[in-house]
Image (spheres, rainbow, N blue to C red):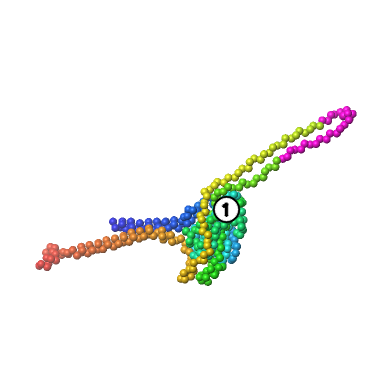
Amino acid sequence: MLQRALIRCFAVFLLGVLGGLAVSSLRYNAPLAGAQSDFPDVCVENANNLVRNCQFNEGMGNWSTFVEKGSNPTFGVESEFPACDSPQCPALRIQAIDWFIGGIYQQIPNVMPGATYWANVIWLVYHPAGKIDGTVGRRIGIDPTGGTDPGSSAIVWSPEIWNKFDSCPYKICRELQVQATAQNTTITVFIRIASTWKNRRDEFSFVPAQFFGEPESFWIDDVGLIPVGGTPLALATSQPEVPTDTPSPVVSVELTTPAEVAEATPTSVVSQPTETATPSLIPSPTPTLTLTRLPTITPTSTRTPTSTRPPRLPTDTPHPTATPTPQVFLLAGALPFVGGGILCLGGGVLALTVLSGLMWMRARRAGMDYVPRRRSLGGEERGDEDDSSA
């Protein structure tokens, strides 16, 4: 009976551990699996996504880089942690020693002019300045003309956010979204990073000098773009040219005398050409292109960054530490189940100890009550009390 109870407790303990791991796994992947219904991961979840290689599974394929100012960072794709700081590797990693303004872009072909497109980026984090506001600016943009100049005035940009990404739910900042109406059959998506805090040392005087020379990393993952509606423009078609009336040939007739007419044996008959009927070409109506309207995703209200000076860090924290990945969900999800299993196992061990003590006491008491008997010289068994009475 006791063995069965212990086996049951141990089974409950194992189930608790496995359940905790499963729950923590679900919670760990929640940010990229639609944890925020109003900010969907269209790269993964929407079949109409037009961004190719949006998860960087093919390296830097279909992506181009740009640098506007500052140093020249390196761009690469990482697949293993900690080089890849993303819940779902691989991810793009940008590394820089000094400040810079730059990013990546991709041209999206075969779009409908006049239609509206919406783009967002799910994962954009950085280290070591990720714990302080005002260090790194981020934004996403769409060039509706399909150009590749990041400084073009035609680009429609999202608000540039400067708050630390830790302040965003699940480290996903919903301000990184934008929509624009296509003006060409090709549009371009831009992801722009302005890491300028090292060039503004007077604003971060509380940061030790050695940290300004420390390498910096930025990670980008899950960039998506989908059509969200709008009326496409009809493509211009050349009207067929209507031919003019065919001119009738001019027939010249010479005047002759009656004698000349008599001498002429054959009578020449000049046949007037019949007027050719002019075909009436009426161009057929130009077909109108239609676009199936997808559910409109209303971008959420964004918060415009203010010029408030970043708060001064405590003196005992000279520099922000590395941002931990969401692995804390593993322990948090498993605690309820692991705690129940440990409690059950501890109860089983306690019960086994108590039962063992009771069995030992019973055996000892039985040994004290036992009186050994011996044989007498006459062959009869006698107890110790008989010997003492004799």
Q: Amino acid at mark 1?
A: Ala
On the picture, is 17 further left or further right than 207? left
Q: Position of residue 215 (x, y in %)?
A: 53, 67
Q: Position of residue 316 (x, y in %)?
A: 46, 71
Q: Residues within 10 Å of mark 1 (few under 14, many from 20)?
A: many
- Give the quarter of the figure containing the N terminus: bottom left
Q: Which residue is nearer to you in this view: 310 or 185?
A: 310
Figure check: 261 above or below 83: above
Q: Residue at x 84, y 34 (%)?
A: 253
Residue 263 magenta-highlighted: yes
Quadrant in the rendering for residue 93: bottom right
Figure check: 252 above or below 62: above
Q: Residue at x 23, y 63 (%)?
A: 361
Q: Residue at x 54, y 60 (%)?
A: 160
- Give the quarter of the figure containing the C terminus: bottom left
Q: Position of residue 208 (x, y in %)?
A: 51, 71
Residue linked to disc 1: 180
Q: Residue at x 49, y 68 (%)?
A: 312
On the picture, is 257 further left or further right than 380? right
Q: Secondary structure at mark 1?
A: strand
Residue 206 magenta-highlighted: no
Q: Residue furthest left?
A: 390
Figure check: 249 above or below 163: above
Q: Position of residue 384 (x, y in %)?
A: 14, 66
Q: Which residue is nearer to you in this view: 385 or 108?
A: 108
Q: Which residue is nearer to you in this view: 319 or 24?
A: 319
Residue 368, visible in the rendered structure: yes
On the picture, is 89 further left or further right than 108? left
Residue 61, visible in the rendered structure: no
- Magenta residues (range): 243-269
| Magenta stretch: helix, strand or loop mostly | loop
